[in-house]
Amino acid sequence: MTLFRVSDFRPIISDIMKLLTHIPSWIKSKYFIAFAAFCVVVLFLDKNDFFTQIDRQKELRELQQSRQYYSTQISAERKELEALKNNPATLEKYAREKYLMKRDNEELFLISEKPDNSKN
């Protein structure tokens, strides 16, 4: 078992001390170190870190867009509902188009359109 002597580490320690003398004093300040630690915690380690906030802002924009879409859809549906309540001709047209209803003395023929896949 070999033991290390303090004299073995002196060159390494002197090299480290030389590197530390080149660091500006404002970086070695306790205020700067505390501020840097705070920034690291806020940007990377916190539950609500910077990247999570960016993702949440993106999700919020998407939700606001979908909210706007659905509010326009709701207003269109309300207009259609009012038209159905107030106009019997509109009600009959809606029943014929959406539910394929017919009168007793009518016959209904459904013709499906096939997409043209051949290119001539």
Image (tube, rainbow, N blue to C red):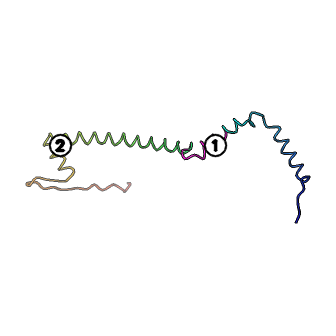
Which residue of the protein is positioned furthest toward the bottom in this rendering? 1
State whether the magenta stretch is mostly helix, strand or loop.
helix
Relative height, residue 78 to residue 3 (above, below): above
Is 42 within the magenta? yes
* Residue at far right of view: 7
Residue 51 falls in image quadrant: top right
The local crowd at label 2, few if under 14, some if 14 to 19, many if 20 or more residues have their Cα within 10 Å, is some
Q: Amino acid at mark 1?
A: Val
Give the mark nearer the N terminus: 2 vs 1.
1
Which residue is at a point 35% across and 41% down the rendered structure image?
69
- Residue 31: image location, x then y, percent: 69, 35
Q: Write the start and end of the magenta stretch as one range.
A: 36-48
Direction from residue 5 to residue 113 in the image, left or right = left
Residue 75 falls left or right of residue 6? left
Q: Which mark is residue 40?
A: 1
Q: How many marks?
A: 2
Q: Residue at x 66, y 42 (%)?
A: 37
Look at the image and tell me in which quarter the C terminus lies. Answer: bottom left
Left or right side of 100 for 30: right
Amino acid type of disc 2?
Answer: Leu
Mark drawn on residue 84: 2
Residue 73 x %, y %: 31, 42
